[in-house]
Amino acid sequence: KEWLSKGHGEYREIPSERDFFQEVKESKNVVCHFYRDTTFRCQIMDKHLTVLAKKHVETKFLKLNAEKSPFLCERLRIKVIPTLALVKDGKTQDYIVGFTDLGNTDDFTTETLEWRLGCADIINYR
């Protein structure tokens, strides 16, 4: 219940960089998708993250428009879109950059992404 009250269990967009800091402070595990509207692969990532957010309520799943967050992109050194920033206890621990870690293909499975997030210990994965 506490997780759900903090926005876990759904994949949602946050409006600004300022919101990012508030969101990561509230939750132990956060996956943040830095995306661009015009990038087709971001839509593929969205599809998988929507599924995983419902399945893994222990982790907060967010998305942030990279074009509206230049400060954060520079600070986190985000150059490739899509990039997932994996944040644990308020610190960025790991990144999933593009689809390289996911088999380098557009039709990777949700399970592949789930496994990769599990390797980073950002979700409870068995």
Image: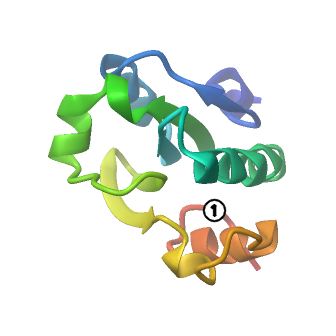
Above or below: residue 94 compared with residue 64: below
Query: Where is residue 61 shown, x and y percent of the image?
Result: 61, 41
**Whether residue 5 is visible:** yes
Quarter location, residue 39: top right
Dividing the image into 4 quarters, which one contains the N terminus?
A: top right
Residue at 53% across, 79% down: 101
Q: Nearer the viewer, residue 47 or 90?
A: 47
Query: Where is residue 30 shown, x and y percent of the image?
Result: 51, 46
Residue at 37% across, 66% down: 94
**Whether residue 21 is visible:** no
* Mark 1 nearby-residue class (10 Å; few <14, some 14–19, many ≥20): many
Residue that label 1 marks? 123
- In the image as oriented, which residue stretches furthest toward the bottom? 103
Dividing the image into 4 quarters, which one contains the C terminus?
A: bottom right
Amino acid type, mark 1: Ile
Query: Where is residue 65 shown, x and y percent of the image?
Result: 45, 30
Above or below: residue 4 compared with residue 76: above
Q: How is the image coloured?
A: rainbow
Q: Nearer the viewer, residue 38 or 58?
A: 38
Above or below: residue 27 compared with residue 79: above
Query: Where is residue 91 shown, x and y percent of the image?
Result: 29, 51
Left or right of residue 30, residue 61 in this image:
right
Residue at 23% across, 31% down: 70
For label 1, the SS is: loop
Quarter location, residue 121: bottom right
